[in-house]
Amino acid sequence: MVALPVSFVAHAARNLHRDASYFKRVFSEEINKLLIEIQIAFLSLLSDSKSKQLTRESCCIGLAACHGFSVVVSKYFSAYQSVETRVLNERLLRAFGESRNHGGSAFMETRNQHAQRMRQNANGNQEAVSMTEDFGIETEVGGAVGMGEAALGAYREMANAAVTMDRPDILYSLMLLSVSLPIWSTRASRNRFSASSIMGINEGRSKTMNEMKIALQPHMKTLVPRLLRACKDPNKQTREQMEALWIGITGGGSYAREIINSHLLITIDTLMDDALNKLWRARVGACAALAEVIVGRTWENLGGGGPISLDDYKDCQNQNAASRLLRLHNVTVRALDDVRLTVRESGELLSRSVRSLTIRLCDSALMNIDKPTSKRIDESVFSTAATSTILPWLVTHGLNSPCQEAVGFSVSCLLGIVEIATSNTLEPVLPELIGSLLMAMSGLEPAALNYLQTRAAGQDSHRFEQLERIRLQMAQAGPISDAITKCLEIVKMLDSDNQKRAIIPHIDSALRCGAGFATRAAAADAVSTLCSQCPTSFSFSGSSISNPTVRLLRALYFASEREKGSGARDKMIHAFGNLAALAPGKSVRSLAIRLCDRYKQATGSNDGMKEYICSLH
């Protein structure tokens, strides 16, 4: 059905570009009179939800032929009542939901029109329609008539790019480049429907596809982020058509990678903006595109520069590698906590890429591994800058996120960094790092284990103890325990006693605020290790409750009293005994007196019996 009008318009445009006098023929005059109706027909077919790929690509060629026809007529035959090219451009942009003043689509349907069309499509099945409305299930509203927003996405992206570049005529070039079916590559189709035939060479337009690609090169800075995002659109139809357009413009493979490298920074910045867009489809595409773009990048690729603090990041105006790295982590955490499932799935893909990028940037040896020996440089400056930038964010914001997936992502990044980072890099955030790792010991433990152990306690105490020992062994054999061990080894190498003392309040906080016994057992092990390897960490003045050592001693005492499991309780009692040897004597005596009183209350006192025996004598 669409082949006939496409052939008519393409034939008229091809002959008109060869010889402008062809317009004086009756066939061309009739085409000119019906040009608006022909364009509307193509747009209607393009917006039909039942249209196949051949129909859509034929409509794209037909719309480009209408444009090429109107260009010649408007230029050489202004005396005739011809359709202006500007009018065709504006109608096409409005149909795709874009215009120079960012107005609404001419084909945009209201919610009432959408409901009416759905009732008509139901073919009398009003029961299903009313059931959908009663349950508040909404389908897509706002696309072209008969077509959802997703199906119109590819053309909307093309129109948006043309409006952004202030070149509406580029929309036709993009539509022609998106044509990918083999039928258009045959010899007969190339002569009849090629870009040179229907678009001509007027106004400096390209005669061939290669020249069209060259003509689009100055606009690639704007096109690349949009095309990459659209290539990852959740709608299959949009994704396939934009992938064909991407290959048509860039050539695919290594050529596409070179184009991305040429516009890397603006591409990353634009995709990070789109990842926070209010439209969920834009967020899905931007996160998936970012996950591919950032693979294998270096600190210099991201903009270079030195580290920045979290306070400077909030007021940072200059975009450098540190600010982009922090923003990537912010975007990832937001995507993992998104309300849409598809966005969260795309966020998981992005989180794996960001984790690999972060560890790569923090490892100087890994950043040099791909470079020739003659060109290898000292990457320790860049790796130190990356580690100093991202560690405070992970400790302060990442581990405190309300989203469990985001916390898991932050812990995974943190463990990877701790494994490859040097002691000098970890020293500035060592107290907060140890406290956060202790809290994470129980935070990442499956809740099912706690449920099983609680159920076992009501049946058999022996099974309760067995499950507790298994959970402690799992926690001690995990990567978090290894990271804590490495951090505690760094503590004894610190030169400043103030840095050593700063760790004690964080261990005390983890012991008091920890939700699981794995955190409390790990905190007790940390206290025992510091008592044996670095006793100066507990040398505070005073014996009151304001003394961090006294507070930690009291926290161990009360935690060991309340602990139900013998495994964790034994660890806390052992840590309490080690710390009592270093704590002020007054605080130890007060706790000893309290412990004796509790013992008397539990077992009974023998003083009354002694007095009775003495009275008998």
Image (cartoon, rainbow, N blue to C red):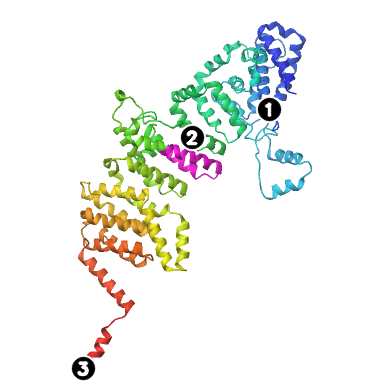
Question: Can residue 559 be found in the magenta stretch?
Answer: no
* Left-right relation of 182 to 425: right
Q: Secondary structure at mark 3?
A: loop
Report the quarter where the C terminus lies: bottom left
Q: Position of residue 330 (x, y in %)?
A: 44, 40
**Which residue is disc 3 drawn over?**
617
Q: Earlier in the sequence, mark 1 or mark 2?
A: 1
Q: Earlier in the sequence, mark 3 or mark 1?
A: 1
Q: Disc 1 residue type?
A: Leu
Q: CA distance from mark 3 to mark 1?
A: 114 Å
Point out which mark residue 46 bears. 1
Q: CA distance from mark 2 to mark 3?
A: 93 Å
Q: Position of residue 607 (x, y in %)?
A: 26, 84
* Left-right relation of 397 to 542: right
Q: Residue furthest bottom?
A: 616
**Image: 577 above or below 245:** below
Q: Earlier in the sequence, mark 2 or mark 3?
A: 2
Q: CA distance from mark 1 to mark 2?
A: 30 Å
Q: Residue at x 65, y 34 (%)?
A: 143
Mark 3 burial class by Cα count in 10 Å: few <14, some 14-19, many 20+:
few
Residue 514 visible to an observer of this rendering: no
**Which residue is disc 2 drawn over?**
273
